[in-house]
Image: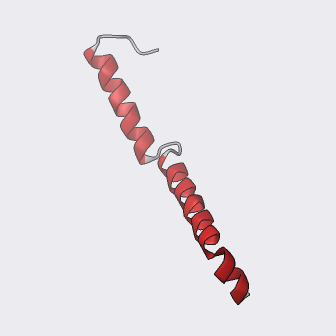
Amino acid sequence: MKVIFEEYSGIIITAVAIIALIAVVGVLLAVDGPVQKAFMRVIEALFTKGNIPAA
């Protein structure tokens, strides 16, 4: 087991970091997530200021 971690520790750490990053982005972009809500507010403001009827 020690040999495996000595040989592949960089790859293991990189894989865990990528998986964690994907999970964080997934949570932020989820339906009713904070990023999605902010994006919807920006779009609604754009339609309001441009006097464009929303579909």
Q: Position of residue 8 (x, y in %)?
A: 67, 74
Of 28 and 55, which appears nearest the observer?
A: 28
Answer left or right for 15 relative to 33. Answer: right
Whether 51 is drawn above or below 38: the answer is above
Of 18 and 40, which appears nearest the observer?
A: 18
Q: Position of residue 50 (x, y in %)?
A: 29, 13
Q: Position of residue 13 (x, y in %)?
A: 58, 70
Give the mark count. Answer: 0
The residue most toward the left is 49
Q: Quadrant of residue 11?
A: bottom right
The residue most toward the bottom is 2
Q: Tell me the residue at 41%/47% (across/down).
A: 34
Q: Tell me the residue at 65%/82% (across/down).
A: 6
Q: Tell me the residue at 40%/32% (across/down).
A: 40
Q: Tell me the residue at 71%/86% (across/down).
A: 3
Answer left or right for 2 relative to 47. Answer: right
Of 22 and 31, which appears nearest the observer?
A: 22
Whether 11 is drawn above or below 24: the answer is below
Whether 7 is drawn above or below 40: the answer is below
Q: Quadrant of residue 43?
A: top left
